[in-house]
Amino acid sequence: MSLEVLGGVYILAAILFVFGLKLMSSPATAVRGNLLSSVGMLIAVVITLLSKEIIDYRYIAGAAILGAVVGAVAARRVAMTGMPEMVALFNGSGGIGSLLVGWAALYSDDRSAFTLITVMISILIGGVTFSGSLVAWAKLSETIGSGAITFGGQRLVNVLILLALVVCSVLIVFNPALTFPLVFVVIALSVLLGVMAVIPIGGADMPVVISLLNSYSGLAACAAGFAINNTILIVAGSLVGAAGLILTNIMCKAMNRSLSNVLFSGFAAPGKATKVEGEVKPITADDAYLILEAASSVVMVPGYGMAVAQAQHVVRELGELLEANGADVSYAIHPVAGRMPGHMNVLLAEANVPYDQLIEMDEINPRIENIDVAIVIGANDVVNPAAREDENSPIYGMPIINVDYARTVFVLKRSMASGFSGVDNPLFFGENTRMLFGDAKQSLSSVIAEFKS
Amino acid sequence: MEAVLLAFILMLSVFLGFELIAKVPATLHTPLMSGANAISGITVVGAIIAAGADLGPWSTWLGALAVFFATVNVVGGYMVTDRMLSMFKKKDSDTRGDS
């Protein structure tokens, strides 16, 4: 088979990737989009297997079957609440894949400076993606603490690692004879850099990290494409790289922080913000039921706490009861609620909440004054009015869902502790706020029981 | 010259990627991310070449290992994205088994 045929089929695969991503822009067509994109992947793989370069299929077959089984079982088994961890692990496996492809390219005949440089870049990005994703996974699954791990001189250490990487790469390019001792140093340093890059980032900033690592996994494939002169790797890899960057940007905007601020500094030390004082008004499930029963519009505002309590199903059940009771129910979701972009949407979709009831922050805020009851389920920072009013607050300037403007706000909360960022929340002391203390799932279940009795 | 052509492809793909993704609604951010992640498993193509082109034992073994990881990424990524996407239903078309 000629190179033209191979190239032609790669173009077809690229078209399928593009259309696949395009169809992702609506929930109605997204399933088809994903299918198209997977068909593109399949034909790219099949045509590569058929190309005359490939003469030995044994190792490929063994590794591919094993990989397919592992991937399929993981994809089947994972619970929706475990999705951020799963995405992190898949990111990591893509990253190590690109690292290995770059490394293997060193054993081909082509030792030009261009190839060596691109190999170094694919090892660097692949290694950072791999170890960074593993650290992100460990943080998300609470294998290690999810808080930021910082120490003095952290930035200096990172700069030194990066510098050492550049020096090794330059040495390899100018003196290819040194490739084999030095490439191992490059690999080790890249992996170390990935760890160093992610450990100082705290749990609430995870949506940014996950989408950034997603971008890196694409860029790593792209760099590997340069290393082995393969167009489909470059095209597909850079599409993913761009997609990840856009998501990263959206996440940063939703927190009113720059990317470098997220990456290099944890939250400013808490405690400087104006101390909030006031009276907390607790409410019982009975009273909550009475208010909800009379409400004609209700908006639910979920946060990471809903995922922790696995409360998405009772949330939907309450939503349905309220609708049956004649209320208008919607679910307002902040872009950075949860631990990855769109986390809450997936959980609610799992619980069978129709996607036309899931609305975005910009859509709810203009009409929140007309909402009878806003129910905050395990969200904190994303509904904190201090972000709007208190210039001393570390989260000042972050766009929030203005639940405090609703006629009544219920806050479901385990106890009176401040949110992840350690920031006090004046919402809890609001005139129209009622606190429903206890496990979110249980609190909602008791309200539901009232409705049914 | 080849490098310049490849760089051109890179530049155009990045812009195309920006255009395509900018329109995705927040509701679909997670499936988009895992779907895009599956596409980044395209590195499997490079892995296949490394493992099967008989470039010596190192290349074969590294390639085979890369095939394994990239296939996990591709198969797992697409399947989990499909699983998530099939949960997104519109109001009138939802058919529930429970409750």
Image (spheres, rainbow, N blue to C red):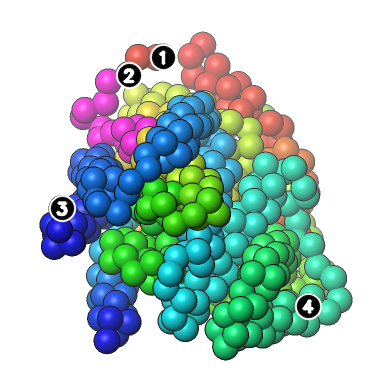
Residue at image location 52% in from the left, 21% down from the top? A448
| Mark 3: few/some/many CA within 10 Å (<14, 14-19, 20+) | few
Q: Secondary structure at mark 4?
A: helix
- Residue type highlighted by circle 1: Ser
Residue A33, image x and y in percent?
A: 23, 46
What is the span of residues highlighted in magenta in the rendered image? B82-96
**Disc 3 versus disc 2: nearer the observer:** 3
**Residue that carries the numbered disc 1 in the rendered image:** B99
* Tag shown at residue B96: 2
In the picture shown, does residue A266 fall above or below A340?
below
**Residue that carries the numbered disc 4 in the rendered image:** A157
Q: Are marks 1 and 3 on the same chain?
A: no
Gap in angstroms between the C-alphas marked 4 and 1: 56 Å
Name the dominant secondary structure of the magenta segment.
loop
Gap in angstroms between the C-alphas marked 1 and 2: 8 Å
* Tag shown at residue A1: 3
* Tag shown at residue A189: none
- Residue type highlighted by circle 2: Arg
Residue A330, image x and y in percent?
A: 38, 42
Is A45 situated left or right of A187 in this image?
A: left
Q: Are marks 1 and 3 in contact (CB under 8 Å)?
A: no
**Disc 4 versus disc 2: nearer the observer:** 4
Q: Are marks 1 and 2 in contact (CB under 8 Å)?
A: yes
Was residue A343 drawn as part of the magenta stretch in this picture? Answer: no
Residue at image location 44% in from the left, 81% down from the top? A112
Q: Is residue A253 visible?
A: no
Gap in angstroms between the C-alphas marked 3 and 2: 51 Å
